[in-house]
Image (tube, rainbow, N blue to C red):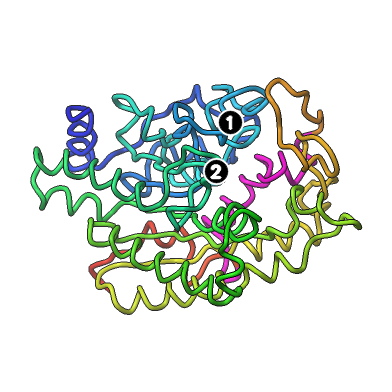
């Protein structure tokens, strides 16, 4: 493993990590600008931290109930089921494509040249809090994901030296999407005491206090360009809709997560003011999802209230089972399964995060962040 990690940073440091084309790993409907940008990567590499929304295989070999390495997951992905909780692309796949990078490999499975452009540390059922997601048994909480990244750096630094590593890492993009499971698989779970201990604002304060510490740790490890994704319309996912007598979005759940999003926005401003030569941006998933759900036909969607693959009310009471037959018209579905967006939605979100306005990316978008000269701030 050490020799592979050395290879990773040797290329990053010495050649600038010009992206290669891994054309055999695609989605049925890739972002249109993919082939144009592959020849010139906008950042040397992307390091990814998060949960099942962006996990691409780190849970495959864990003793975990949170896995997606079976059909029909990946039904529209040329590589088939990889561990992505999607029919094809995740949001970070779409962002990697827009940045001119190949798709970023999972930490647990990365081999050889696949590691040259970054690593994905995300894990299904993971949370900001270590205790989150324990119902699924195996998972890699955010704290452990940060330690895994630190192990990567330790191996590289021992061979290349801190200065070379630091200069290279500072140019890379760090994408972090955490918090969903701290609500769905902690606060809202009856076998957790959390709801009796904290009201919505107190829990948001607890999460973002920990989140700030974790992101500061990544900064201290050399990260300088951060895209932090907020939470979306969690009250409108099929698993929540299935619990409603009317089948409508849960205002209670949507309102529950709003203090977290508000706190994350404040955290972004605080980190930008306190951590020199760095830039943190906020990806407003809530706004993007609101637009899609309010005007689905504008984006080509017809079905917004049930999963393409699942069982029970809204196809959300039991999530997509092995070898279950999914819907045929997947491009028309907002949700792939009980919890996760379809690939079509993920590509839309990734594109908007990449080049959208202040309503979706604050105080700048990912394209602007990638081009930012940190020496000037």
Numbered label attached to residue 68: 1
Residue 130 position (above or below residue 294):
above
Q: Name the image quarter holding the C terminus.
A: bottom left
Q: Position of residue 262 (x, y in %)?
A: 55, 75
Mark 2, other Cα within 10 Å: few <14 / some 14–19 / many ≥20: many
Q: Quadrant of residue 253?
A: bottom right
Q: Residue at x 49, y 63 (%)?
A: 365
Q: CA distance from mark 1 to mark 2?
A: 9 Å
In the image: residue 56, left or right of residue 340 = left
Which residue occupies the extreme right position in the image?
246
Q: Position of residue 177 (x, y in %)?
A: 49, 54
Q: Name the image quarter holding the N terminus.
A: top left
Q: Residue at x 60, y 27 (%)?
A: 77
Q: Secondary structure at mark 1?
A: loop
Is residue 13 part of the magenta span, yes or no?
A: no
First in sequence: mark 1 vs mark 2: 2
Q: Residue at x 21, y 35 (%)?
A: 11
Mark 1, other Cα within 10 Å: few <14 / some 14–19 / many ≥20: many
Q: Position of residue 72 (x, y in %)?
A: 68, 25
Q: Secondary structure at mark 2?
A: loop
In the image: residue 48, left or right of residue 151 = right
Residue 97 position (above or below residue 200):
above
Q: Which residue has dot 2 on it?
A: 52
Contact, mark 1 vs mark 2 (Cβ under 8 Å): yes
Is residue 358 part of the magenta span, yes or no?
A: yes
Q: Position of residue 102 (x, y in %)?
A: 43, 35
In the image: residue 303, left or right of residue 227 = right
Q: Residue at x 77, y 68 (%)?
A: 251
**Considering depth in this image, is 373 or 172 the residue closer to the camera?**
172
Q: Bounds of the magenta span? A: 330-359
**Considering depth in this image, is 343 or 181 the residue closer to the camera?**
181
**Considering depth in this image, is 268 or 29 the residue closer to the camera?**
268
């Amino acid at each position: 493993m050490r020799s592979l990690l050395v290879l990773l940073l040797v290329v990053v440091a010495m050649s600038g990590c010009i992206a290669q084309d891994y054309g055999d790993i695609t989605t049925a409907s890739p972002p249109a600008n993919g082939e144009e940008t592959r020849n010139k990567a906008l950042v040397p590499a992307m390091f990814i931290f998060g949960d099942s929304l962006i996990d691409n295989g780190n849970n495959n070999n864990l003793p975990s109930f949170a896995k997606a390495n079976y059909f029909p997951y990946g039904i529209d992905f040329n590589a088939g089921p990889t561990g992505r909780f999607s029919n094809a692309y995740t949001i970070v796949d779409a962002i990697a494509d827009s940045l001119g990078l190949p798709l970023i490999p999972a930490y647990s499975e990365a081999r050889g040249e696949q590691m040259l452009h970054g690593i994905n540390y995300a894990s299904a059922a993971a949370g900001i809090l270590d205790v989150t997601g324990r119902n699924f048994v195996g998972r890699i909480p955010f704290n452990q994901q940060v330690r895994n990244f630190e192990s990567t750096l330790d191996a590289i630094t021992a061979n290349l030296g801190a200065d070379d590593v630091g200069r290279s890492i500072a140019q890379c993009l760090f994408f972090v999407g955490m918090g969903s499971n701290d609500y769905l698989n902690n606060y809202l779970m009856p076998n957790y005491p959390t709801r009796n201990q904290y009201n919505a604002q107190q829990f948001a304060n607890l999460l973002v206090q920990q989140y700030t510490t974790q992101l500061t740790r990544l900064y201290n490890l050399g990260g300088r360009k951060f895209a932090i994704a907020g939470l979306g319309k969690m009250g409108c996912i099929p698993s929540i809709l299935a619990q409603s007598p009317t089948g409508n979005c849960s205002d209670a759940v949507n309102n529950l997560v709003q203090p977290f999003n508000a706190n994350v926005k404040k955290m972004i401003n605080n980190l930008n003011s306190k951590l020199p030569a760095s830039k943190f941006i906020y990806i407003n998933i809530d706004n993007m999802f609101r637009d899609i759900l309010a005007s689905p036909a504008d984006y080509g969607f017809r079905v917004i209230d049930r999963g393409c693959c699942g069982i029970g009310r809204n196809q959300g009471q039991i999530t997509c089972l092995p070898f279950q037959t999914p819907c045929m018209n997947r491009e028309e579905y907002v949700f792939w399964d009980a919890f996760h967006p379809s690939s079509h939605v993920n590509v839309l979100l990734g594109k908007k995060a990449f080049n959208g306005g202040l309503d979706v990316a604050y105080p700048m978008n990912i394209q602007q962040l990638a081009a930012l000269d940190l020496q000037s701030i």
